[in-house]
Image: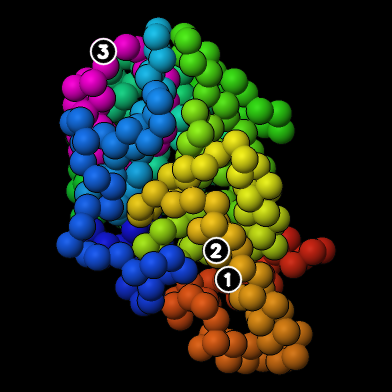
Amino acid sequence: MSERSTGEGLHDRSAFGPGPAEPQDSTEAVLPTVDAGWLRVGGRTHAMTLPSFDVNVGLVIGDERALLVDTGSGPADAARIHAAVREVTDLPLVVVNTHAHADHFFGNAYFAAQGVEEFWAHAGAAAAMEAAGESQRALVRTADPAMAAADGEHTGLHLPTHLVRDEPVDIDLGGHTVTLFHLGQGHTDGDLLVGSDSVLFAGDLVEEGGHPSFEDSYPYEWRKTLGKIIAIDELYSEIVPGHGRLVDPDFVRSQLKNLRQAIRTCTTAIHEASVDYTKAVPVLPYGPVQSRHLIIRLKETEPGNVVPPH
């Protein structure tokens, strides 16, 4: 959840320095505006950045149905997305949530009220939504006060109706197929990737404009998952990150390089320092807040010592 628009959230960007990509001019739009706010990134595939948290959402238009990737942080975001969708298509919708953080699924109830019946997520994400969704409401208090207070229409939590597990799922939209797949733990326990045309919606497994968020992450596995994304780069030349501007596989390679470096530094500090292993923070490639979260999660998820996120 990006700090750039609200000053608060799951992904604390207040202490972040520049990410591993080229610096972004803050006067530019995160994604160029084309056709009702959507940027065409593939033949039938579009993306749009929301003002709240700079979250990227996706739209894939088939001949019979359209598929929406993520629904924003509440009914306010969802209404904005829905209006933009209806500017370009009146086809019935399928919704996919990339993971279980508020800024990516709190708009589900609005879409359910518009008649959407099919909501997809990874099984791990669905379980996390049910277990911890209510505890995330305060995180959207600036972006959507009604959602934060659970007060008003469409402010309930609408959970996925269809689950992806170990095997990929192909969704036929009529004349075009979208693939949903899980490559392993990373940003969360249930990160789902969405492939369409040559475009990969990576959710918060890939972050542009801010460093990765580690609060409920699995850093050792994240390293492996990024490697798997790179391994299929011949299929996907355009990557839509959870936040920020479009990137390519080389950006993912840079993010993986930074993560590998950070894990090596942290694990050395953890094993050499009996108490104050946080001395590693100043030399990590991330800001101090996320560096501390990384160290905590490395300790908690060290092989043989896996502790669920708080």
The numbered dot on residue 90 is 3
At 39% from the left and 23% from the top, the residue drawn is 44
What coloring was used for the rendering?
Answer: rainbow
On the question of residue 151 being in view, the answer is: no
Q: Residues within 10 Å of mark 1 (few under 14, many from 20)?
A: some
Spatial CA span between label 2 and label 3: 38 Å
Residue 278: x, y in percent?
58, 87
Q: Gap between marks 1 and 3, in whole Å?
A: 43 Å
Q: Which residues are magenta?
A: 69-95
Q: Position of residue 14 (x, y in %)?
A: 32, 73
Q: Is residue 115 above or below residue 184?
A: above
The answer to whether residue 26 is magenta is no
Q: Residues within 10 Å of mark 2 (few under 14, many from 20)?
A: many
Describe the element under mark 1 as helix, strand or loop.
helix
Tell me, yes or no, whether the two marked residues, 2 and 1, touch with CB atoms within 8 Å: yes
Q: Residue at 37% across / 62% down in the picture?
A: 209
**Distance of mark 2 from mark 1, alpha carbons?**
5 Å
Write down the residue under mark 2: 255
Front residue of 213 and 56 = 56
* Towards the viewer: 150 or 284: 284
Query: In the rendered structure, are the residues bearing label 1 and label 3 in contact, judged by CB atoms less than 8 Å apart?
Result: no
Figure quadrant of residue 10: bottom left
Looking at marks 2 and 3 on the same chain, the residue that comes earlier in the sequence is marked by: 3
Expressed as whole percent of the image width and height from the top left, the position of residue 112 reads 34, 21
Image quadrant occupied by the C terminus: bottom right
| SS state under label 3 | loop
Residue under label 1: 258
At label 1, the amino acid type is Asn
Give the residue displayed 62% in from the left and 23% down from the top.
169
